[in-house]
Amino acid sequence: MADQQTSIVTGGAGFLGSHLCDHLIARGDRVICIDSLITGSLKNIAHLVDRPDFEFIQQDIIQPVHLPGPVHDIFNLACPASPAKYTLDPVHTFNTSVIGSQNMLNLAVDKGARILQASTSEVYGDPSVSVQSEDYRGNVNTVGPRSCYDEGKRAAETLFHDFRQRYGLVTKIVRIFNTYGPRMSLDDGRAVSNFIVQALKGEDLTVYGTGEQTRSFCFVEDLIHGICRMMETPDNIAGPINLGNPEEHTIKELAEMILQKTHSTSKLTYLDLPVDDPLRRKPDITLAREILQCEPQYTLSEGLDLTIPYFRNLLPGLDKLRVVAGG
Ligand code: UDP
């Protein structure tokens, strides 16, 4: 198709990236998915790889990316995103956000493409305000276990801002709050995936700390909608804009909801709270509402009802799975 637009999704074989690829293909784009497969999985894009409008390139964006032909939109999602995975090789995690982002920004300059950065609520660190709006500057430890991710993502935001100033590039930043749904990695140690897997296997649910810490969980479909709306905004809208669902729950409430929904007889067991684990996290989504006209469509209860069957279908494989747990 002559007027078909080409979009690049880095991290396109990951949980969020693969859903984004699906969405872009469905709206008629040609999609180039770039993924190192360090945490992404070919299983997430298996249904796309034979399509003529989909191309998969296995590459780490820490290496410069060169591609022939026009590119319209670049969605930069590449980076391990769960604490259990991004702390495994912290130098690589940091470089993925910083050098990787710079490589994709250079490609955007070459192609005259718009580019969106998947930033994160982690830029707020362990927040000292209970609802985080975009003008809150955060409370981040520069030398803790989470710093490689938090500081890498913060530096990436700076690079996006500086490329906009320096080269007139059309840049967009969204800050993604905890998101869940089908295709979450089984073994990445996240609360939602750990609890569902543990409940289905009849194992104790590993709650870290008292379980009174909070998160606000967003269903993947709402998140992808927000990302696409952000990319479609006029060129002068750069963000950052928070994307998430402000429905806040304690981790204990999440665990109990999953026990009830899976009809599991598992119990809660309490382990140490990881270092620098944020106590409260809840997005202020006023900007997303006003600028993107985004309103979350799924409650946590509704989203879990769509997520649990995904893990249930993997149940035979769950026998062999050792959940990454231990705060
Ligand atoms: N958590 C937990 N048990 C688990 C995994 C996570 O209690 O098996 C807690 C974790 O300490 C944090 C919250 O759940 O307070 C959310 O953790 P997750 O890794 O899902 O996301 P993030 O910490 O990045 O918000």
Image (cartoon, rainbow, N blue to C red):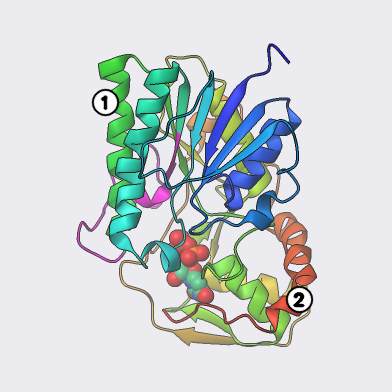
- Label 2 sits on residue: 315
Q: Amino acid at mark 1?
A: Asp
Mark pair 1, 2: CA separation: 47 Å
- x 29%, y 32%: residue: 159
Magenta-colored stretch includes residue 124: yes
Q: Position of residue 58 (x, y in %)?
A: 52, 47
In the foreground, 299 or 177: 177
In the foreground, 172 or 64: 64
Q: Position of residue 307 (x, y in %)?
A: 72, 60
Element at label 2? helix
Q: Position of residue 186 (x, y in %)?
A: 61, 69
Q: Amino acid at mark 2?
A: Leu
Q: Main secondary structure of the magenta part?
A: loop
Magenta-colored stretch includes residue 316: no
- x 59%, y 49%: residue: 13
Question: Along the horizontal axis of the image, is 153 left or right of 216?
Answer: left
